[in-house]
Amino acid sequence: MHAVPNVILTRLGSLQLVAPLIFLSWLLTAYPWAWFLTDPPEERWSSLFPPGVLAATVAQVVLLVATAAALAGSIRLCRLPLPAFGLLLASIAIPTLAWQRPEIWAPQIIPIDIALAALTLYSTLRVTLTAASLALGLLVACLITRWVLLGEGGTPSEPGMALTLGTAVLIGTVIRQRRAQAAATLRQASAEAVNAERLRIARDLHDMVAHSLGVIALQAGAARRVMRTQPEAAREAVHNIEKVGQETLSGLRRVVSSLRDVDPDRPDSPTALPSLTTLDELVATTRAAGVDIDVSRQGEPRALPMEIDAAAYRIVQEAVANVIRHAETDACRILISFREGELFVEVVDHGTGRGRRPRAGFGLTGMRERVEMLNGTIVTGPRAEGGFRVAAHLPIPADGR
């Protein structure tokens, strides 16, 4: 019973669009009156109206007045809800009283139900309760009038109409709650998306800055040690520090500019995500810092989804940064393996410093979060033969997207 009003009202954007529906339903329910008045007197027959009641010209005027009240009430329901709702009630009460009907014709409550549901959906609780009280008051007045003044018995139709009014309020309330819940869900999803983006930016900044500062620290230490004995080597180290610093600043600008969908270094691209295609640049910078990297690639390289490509690069970058800062070694090994349905990334070193790791840092936590977001797995920890190992399995969707 609720399905039709539910579908209708959920597709309406404002009370202004409800007005045609209310007036149309009023015209349909008033059709027997118009039919009775327009037919020749000898052909008039109706189970609704007693003979001779609607024959006078005044009855036609009453119908026009009721139609005008219904039209005005439908149009003004948006701006003046309670007066407009009163006009709608008058549009069904006036003909009933003028034509001496003992009760309101049951179908005539339909436009009132639609209007009440619309008020529940779009207006305040006070307006809804007032409108419902007015409608119930009209039904009670008709019932009392028939029982007291006319002395008529039988099964009254007013309780059934009152039930439809309650149903209309219930439908409007349910739809309003669903819309509020949907809006809250949308706000929550938006907030989660913002938090996820902030976390991604924080990870990118951490990975990029941590790696660059590790390289700069090594180069600065090397320059300090050979400044007096090997000026050329010191100048080369300082040059590498300058280069790494400029690259880091450029990367910071890209990350910050991604918030505005603008990349100052690449105007043809809104963002510049890290990629395994630039791994050679990372390797060259790390080698210049004094850490030799052996890169191995297995399997047939293929295009990777953006998020998997970026996550793989960041994992390698963070692992290499940890080698520079903590491993106390001058060499490490990187393996990039394209396997069936997954990308395998491994960084291994033979150092000693990282094996005494007392607790996980932000870098390892960031790696794990990146991999888990992509439904992958990662293993990090000291190796039995010495050194430290980072190994990540990143599943690749079958469609490559």
Image: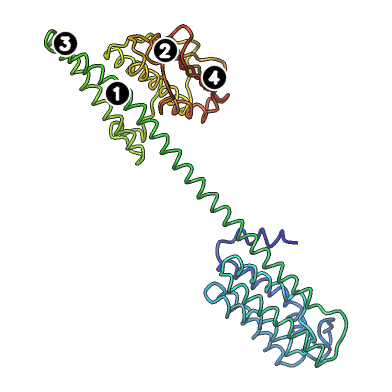
Q: Are marks 1 and 2 in contact (CB under 8 Å)?
A: no
Identify the residue position indicated by label 1 in the image: 212
**Mark 3 Cα shell of 10 Å, populated few (<14), some (14-19), many (≥20):** some
Label 2 crowd bin: few (<14), some (14–19), many (20+), radius 10 Å:
many
Crowd around label 4: few <14 · some 14–19 · many ≥20 (10 Å): some
Which numbered disc, 4 or 2, marks the residue that appears first in the sequence? 2
Residue occupying image coordinates x 58% and y 56%: 179
Marks 4, 1: nearer the viewer: 1
Q: Which residue sits at x=63%, y=62%? A: 9
Where is residue 241, by image quadrant?
top left
Percent of width and height locating residue 78: 54, 72
In this rendering, would 273 be left or right of 337?
left
Query: Which residue does the numbered mark 4 point to in the structure image?
Result: 342
Element type where label 4 sits in the image:
strand
Name the residue: 34% across, 41% down. Answer: 260
Q: At numbered mark 1, what does the secondary structure look like: helix, strand or loop? A: helix
Q: Nearer the viewer, mark 4 or mark 2?
A: 2
Rounded to the nearest angstrom, the CA distance separating label 4 from label 2 is: 17 Å
> In 3D space, how far apart are the residues under numbered discs 3 and 4 (Cα atoms)?
46 Å
- Tag 2, which secondary structure? strand
Residue type at mark 4?
Answer: Glu
Whether residue 197 is situated above or below residue 40 in the rendered picture:
above
Q: Which residue is mark 2?
A: 334
For marks 1 and 2, the one nearer the N-term is 1
Left/right of residue 390 with respect to residue 321 in the rendered view: right
Q: Residue type at mark 3?
A: Val
